[in-house]
Every structure is written in C-alpha cells, then in structure tokens.
Image (cartoon, rainbow, N blue to C red):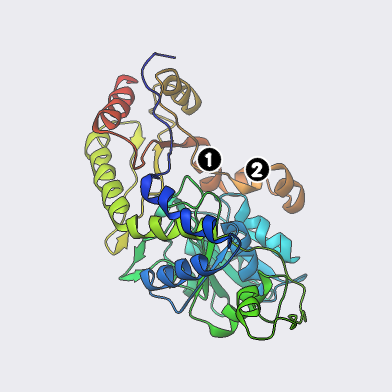
Amino acid sequence: MTGRRRIEIALPALGEEEWQALREPLLSGWVTQGPKVAAFERAFARRHAVKHALAASSCTTALHLILQALELGPGDEVIVPALTWVATANAVVYTGARPVLADVEPGTFNLDPEQVARRVTSRTRAVVAVHLFGLCADVDAIREAAPGAVLVEDAACAAGASYKGRWAGSLGRAAAFSFHPRKAITTGEGGMVTTDDDALAARVESLRNHGASISEEKRHAGPRPYLMADYDRLGFNYRMTDVQGAIGLVQLAKLDGLLEERRSWAGYYERELRDISWLATPRAAEGYGHAWQSYVLRVDAAAVPRPRDEVMEALQEQGIATRPGTHALHTLGFYRELLGHRAEDFPNARDGERLSISIPLHNRMSEADYARVVEALRDLG
C-alpha cells in the first residue's frame, strides 16, 4: 500500500454538535429510551411526511417489528429481493414465515416487478421492497405485481430519498430505516419504523418494549408509581437509548445538507467515470430522488481489463477502500440450505454481487479524495 492517506469506504459525519448533544441525557441520568428518543421520532416523522415514527435498536429489529406486527407466521410467504443485505430475509425468518426470493433489475439492483409477479402464490402475505443503496424501488409497479400483499419498505439506505414526489418511508404500509455508521445519518446502531397505520404503530410500540401495554416513559411519568404495565403479547427489548436519540436529533437536522453534498459528488463521479468502457455508473430515473448511501459501479465482465476482485485489490493497494455492492442471498450458506436455490436461479442477483464495486462516497471526503478515486479507476485501463 502507498503512504498516502487511506480513503475509507464510509465515515460518519459526526462532530462537536453531536458531542454537546450528549450532555443532557448523560447529566439528567435518563439514558434509556425517553424524551430525546421521542423528540427524534417526532422530527423524523415530520421530515418523511408520516404520522408515526418509532425508534428501534437497529434497522433489523425495526423490520422484524413491522413483520411481527403484521402477525406473519408459519405458512406465510414474504417476497424479498435476491440481492440485499442478509438482514432483510432474516427478519422474515424470525417470524416463522418463509422468504421467497425474486430477482432484481440489473440497472437499479432493485426488485424487478415482473419477477415479483412470478413469485406470488396464495400464501404471499407481504413484499419487502428494498431501496438499495439509496434508490427507491419502483413501488407502484411492485404493488401491481402483488395485489393484496402488504408492501413493506426496507429503507435502510434511504433516509431522505424520494419516489414520484413522495418520501421513502411513506410509500408502503410501513418502512424500516437504518442509522448504522455507513448510512447518511447515524446513531451508531439504531433504526426507525415509519407508518401511517395507527393500529400497526400501536403494536410496534408495544412489541419493542417487551409487549407492554404502556411505555416505560408514560408509566414513570404518571401519578401512580405502583402501577405496572400489563403484558398480553410476547414482545422484545428493541428500544433505542436517549443517548442515541440525542445524536439522532442533531444528525437529522443535517440530513438535507449531507444529501445535497452526496448528490453533488455522485454527479462528479458520473461525469468523470461514464466514458470508462468497462464500468456502468448508477443513475436515478426521472422522478426518483436518490439518497446515495453508496455509489455502486457495475463492471462489464466482457470488457474489464482484469477481474472485478483484482480491480478491488488494485484500489486497495492505492489506499482506496471498496466493497462489493451486497449479498446474493441465495448463494449464502444458510439460505442455500433453507431454500435450495442454485446460483444461476437469480442471475441478476448473482452478477450484482460478483460484478459490483462500491467506491468511497461520504461526507468526510475532500475534493482531492474524489479526484484520487477517479484517477485510480482511469489508470486501470
């Protein structure tokens, strides 16, 4: 590796404001879920134009809460993309339902509505539309492909993304967001459920707190300290802490500025890389507001000067971190055993994992960093 500064694949944009925001929960002693989480939830709901936002410990637990609140279980089927982070399918399995894989579009890496239609059966209860890398899936076409199925958004990458004038998180029955450090805004770990469904929101609120009939905050703030919550459903401890909520409030206030910067540099990459014959650059169609959680290139296997993995190794040697886009679920050991698919059963997902390269794009990169990435790719041939 060269002695030049390493350009990481992602770094969170955290600073003095987040540091100062920690003072109140730390000094007050209320560090579990409380007023800061509640304020973060209200602000997130306003920003994404939904009635309810409910914080969770991660996007995985947020998605599990949604599917559990929908009362999915054994005998039910949930269609998920064959190309996605493993947690999308895991959350289905947690409920006892069966994930049914559908292939993705090669250009967007998102669910192909035609493939969804082919996977619908009498047992199909829901479709999880993943907004991969920050680009919303074509939810209208997916809804038409699976009439009667509940549409759930895996919006892990999509805070601030939009589709036909509507915000991610408001496009289906419910959505799950991530605040992992690789996302545009972060709370360390953390997630959020959004929904306009009052009954679903009430079930999610109970389920994330062990199945309690009332929240801990309401119980502690009430005039009768001897009262205990009733527990008439099996729940989980999926709560967010007020320490995270305090950070989330500051990060959310920065979201639009962070996204504007990411979109600007995504445009720079597009201009500088589009004439490299062996690379396909990602693009958002008209009507889509891309959040650019990641900038994922696709290698043309027929034209690339060397295999994808060697391209990534060459960049690594120059101090530039890269990653494959994400998993082809059907090739992973657990799902290969559970579902019994062959690699060629979902060719676009297979190639999406094998031929994709996520290059650095985040809010702690400099102009010189972006120029280095472009120069390195151009020098490969």
Q: Report whether 95 appears left or right of 352.
A: right
- The residue furthest front is 27
Q: Is residue 275 above or below residue 232?
A: above
**Circle 1: is it few (<14), some (14-19), or many (20+) Cα within 10 Å?**
many
Residue drawn at (76%, 78%) of the image: 233
Of the residues shown, which amino acid type is indicated by label 1? Glu
Q: Which residue is mark 2?
A: 331
Of residue 250 and residue 340, the one placed in the foreground of this image is 250
Residue drawn at (73%, 46%) of the image: 334
**Circle 2: is it few (<14), some (14-19), or many (20+) Cα within 10 Å?**
many
Find out whether the residues at labels 1 and 2 contact each other: C-beta distance under 8 Å: yes
Residue 101 lies in quadrant: bottom right
Of the residues shown, which amino acid type is indicated by label 2? Thr
Tag of residue 353? 1
Q: Position of residue 169 (x, y in %)?
A: 45, 68
Q: Is residue 198 above or below residue 277?
A: below
Rounded to the nearest angstrom, the CA distance separating label 1 from label 2 is: 10 Å
Name the image quarter holding the C terminus. top left
Residue drawn at (32%, 69%) of the image: 164
Q: Report whether 356 appears left or right of 261.
A: right
SS at mark 2? helix
Residue drawn at (72%, 42%) of the image: 333
Q: Report whether 179 appears left or right of 281.
A: right
Name the image quarter holding the N terminus. top left
Q: Is residue 369 above or below residue 280?
A: above
SS at mark 1? helix
Q: Position of residue 102 (x, y in %)?
A: 57, 58
